[in-house]
Amino acid sequence: MHRRSFLRFLKCSAAAAVAAHWFDSSSPWLFATQAESRPAPGSNNRPQVALTMDDPKVDLSPFMNWTEANRRILRVMKERKLNAALFVSGKHVDRPEGKTLLGAWDDAGHLICNHSYSHLMYLRKTTFEAFAADFLRDEPIIAPYRHRTEHSVIPF
């Protein structure tokens, strides 16, 4: 995402967050399902959030190797009782070390998802046919894992 697009997105998100605080559950502006889905005060229901992580890789940096980074991320997520959807671009993990990395995420119960092999941007100089082929090229990489998605969402 380009800086200006990100800043516009951030501005809209902030405005939406502020607007959401103006309305309470008795407001006629909220749909009943939204008001009913909120946890009751004092209940044990915790807020939920969808956590995604993109592009794990086995070539990380000269300052920290991928095994140490991976171990730390998975440890903190386990401590916090968090699960994530890991969107995998095959080009970053298409080697034996990649199987070890993805296996650790799978063993920890995280969802393994297809993020296309080369991380092509569909609407930027890529035809649908080329994008679809690249997306399908990633499927055999995530296929062996128990927690993989059957039909991953195509990333845009």
Image (cartoon, rainbow, N blue to C red):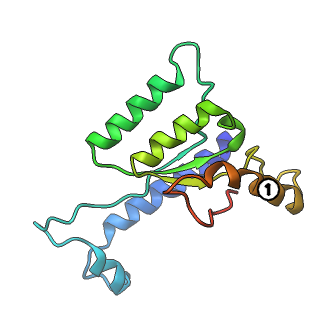
Residue 32, percent across and down? Answer: 33, 86
Viewer-side residue, 95 vs 152:
95
> Residue shown at 27%/74% (left/top)?
24
Residue 42, percent across and down? Answer: 10, 66
Q: Can residue 18 be seen from the camera position used here?
A: yes
Q: Quadrant of the C terminus?
A: bottom right
> Residue shown at 38%/51% (left/top)?
83
**Local crowd size for mark 1, using a 10 Å CA cut-off: few (<14), some (14–19), many (≥20):** some
Tag 1's secondary structure?
loop
For badge 1, the amino acid type reads: Tyr
Residue 109, percent across and down? Answer: 40, 52
Q: Can residue 57 be seen from the camera position used here?
A: no
> Residue shown at 59%/24% (left/top)?
60
Circle 1 residue: 122
Instruction: Tell me the quarter of the picture where residue 129 sits.
Output: bottom right
Q: Quadrant of the N terminus?
A: top right
Q: Looking at the image, is 33 positioned above or below residue 49? A: below
Instruction: Tell me the quarter of the picture where residue 76 sits.
Output: top left
Residue 72, percent across and down? Answer: 38, 29
Q: Is residue 95 left or right of residue 97?
A: right
